[in-house]
């Protein structure tokens, strides 16, 4: 892999990772509700799922999903159902008056394990990520040189860029926490994030290859 190829990968990954999606929304929401430290567990869950899916795609499972559309559809519908559930849960989340230090989390902190699992499930809920990785990563791997070192470099680069954007979105959520201390604003935020998650679910259910 040439340096020019790597820089092209960096640029494209930077743009793709910056695009708002379920992962970024979840990280921002977790930070706003439970604080930045709690959001770190969400980030870890999302990143674990993404790196696992990208590794799976490198093993050829992306081609398997393309060869068996019914398996892909089952995974797609399951992912859409989970995002819809998450959206409804967020929409109906109880709102209480918040007082005191504005730097404190809006809601009682959840266990890190629960936030990690939520991040893991949200990131893994879209099987298109496997197909995306299967089509995207090979474009930057030189076929005449050992593939494993190149894959390791690309995966590490992706992890750094994606995590950097997680931090940016989590920081945005932290800033929102000051405004969300008002019950009316928090209620609107819950419904907005819930509606967006439901919208992601609808798009996933409707879009076909």
Image (tube, helix red, strand yellow):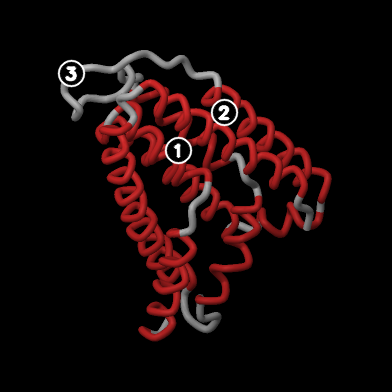
Q: Is residue 24 left or right of residue 54?
A: left
Instruction: Identify which residue, 177 or 39, lies in the foreground.
Output: 177
Residue at 52% of width from left, 44% of height from top? 22
Residue at 56% of width from left, 41% of height from top? 124
Q: Which residue is mark 1?
A: 26
Against 174, residue 160 (above or below) is below
Q: Residues within 10 Å of mark 3 (few under 14, many from 20)?
A: few
For the residues bearing labels 1 and 2, Cβ distance under 8 angstroms = yes
Find residue 186 and report its image quarter: top left
- Between marks 3 and 2, how big is the CA–CA gap? 29 Å
For the residues bearing labels 3 and 2, Cβ distance under 8 angstroms = no
Query: Where in the figure is residue 105, as x and y percent of width and height?
Result: 27, 25
Find residue 30 and report its image quarter: top left
Q: Which residue is mark 2?
A: 86
Instruction: Identify which residue, 127 or 169, lies in the foreground.
Output: 169
Q: Which residue is mark 3?
A: 100
- Between marks 1 and 3, how big is the CA–CA gap? 25 Å
- Between marks 1 and 2, how big is the CA–CA gap? 10 Å
Q: Residues within 10 Å of mark 2 (few under 14, many from 20)?
A: many
Q: Residues within 10 Å of mark 1 (few under 14, many from 20)?
A: many
Which callout, 1 or 2, points at the residue further toward the start of the chain? 1
């Amino acid at each position: 892999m040439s340096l020019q190829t790597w820089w092209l990968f960096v640029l494209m990954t930077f743009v793709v990772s910056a695009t708002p999606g379920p992962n970024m929304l979840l990280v921002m929401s977790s930070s706003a509700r439970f604080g930045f430290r709690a959001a770190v567990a969400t980030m870890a869950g999302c990143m674990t799922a993404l790196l696992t899916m990208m590794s799976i795609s490198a093993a050829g499972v992306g081609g398997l999903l393309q060869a068996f559309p019914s398996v892909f559809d089952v995974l797609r519908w399951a992912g859409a159902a989970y995002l819809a559930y998450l959206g409804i849960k967020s929409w109906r989340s109880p709102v209480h008056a918040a007082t005191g230090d504005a730097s404190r989390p809006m809601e009682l902190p959840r266990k890190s394990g629960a936030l990690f699992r939520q991040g893991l499930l949200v990131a893994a809920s879209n099987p298109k990520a496997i197909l995306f990785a299967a089509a995207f990563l090979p474009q930057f791997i030189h076929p005449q040189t050992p593939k494993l070192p190149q894959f390791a470099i690309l995966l590490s680069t992706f992890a750094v860029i994606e995590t950097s954007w997680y931090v940016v979105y989590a920081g945005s959520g932290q800033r929102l926490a000051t405004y969300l201390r008002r019950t009316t604003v928090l209620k609107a935020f819950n419904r907005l994030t819930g509606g967006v998650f439901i919208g992601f679910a609808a798009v996933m259910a409707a879009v076909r290859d």
